[in-house]
Image (cartoon, rainbow, N blue to C red):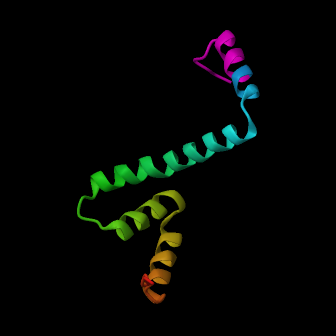
Amino acid sequence: MLSDTSPDAEKIQIDRLRKTSVAERLCRVREWSRMLVHLPRQGIARANPGLDDRGLDLLWVEQQYGQEPAVKLQEYLEKRPSCKATTH
């Protein structure tokens, strides 16, 4: 496997990772997952400034999963009743 990290630096990284708690590791994974969704969506928003949130979400789904799932999602969203927030 090709790496631009020196073996000594890699050993330090692995050692630090082993010392982190499970909770901290899960927190990092969650942050990375959010970033993996947020960054491409941000690029889609910049490339399509006129789209609303739903349009951006549909384009994101299309780029990540293909046109067919995006079309099915759009059809589902158009058919479902709208959700209205209620206040008490």
Q: Is residue 11 magenta?
A: yes
Q: Is residue 87 above or below residue 5?
A: below
**Quadrant in which the N terminus appears:** top right
- On the image, the x and y values in percent for residue 28 come to 61, 40
Q: In the rendered structure, which segment of residues is drawn in magenta?
A: 1-14
Q: Which x, y percent locates residue 40?
A: 42, 50
Answer whether residue 46 is magenta in the image.
no
Residue visible at 38% across and 70% down in the picture? 54
| Rendering quarter of residue 9 | top right
**Is residue 22 depicted above or below 34 in this figure?**
above
Which quarter of the picture shows residue 49?
bottom left
Task: Kindly identify the residue that appears in the image at 43 percent across and 47 percent down.
Answer: 39
- Residue at far front of view: 88
Name the spot of residue 38 as percent of width and height, x first: 45, 50
Count of numbered circles in the view: 0
* Quadrant of the frame with the C terminus: bottom left
Q: Closest to the observer: 50 or 35?
A: 35
Is 16 on the left-hand or right-hand side of 48?
right
Residue located at (63% from left, 12% from top): 6
Q: Is residue 6 left or right of residue 73?
A: right
Q: Position of residue 43 (x, y in %)?
A: 35, 49
Residue at x 63% of width, y 43% of height: 27
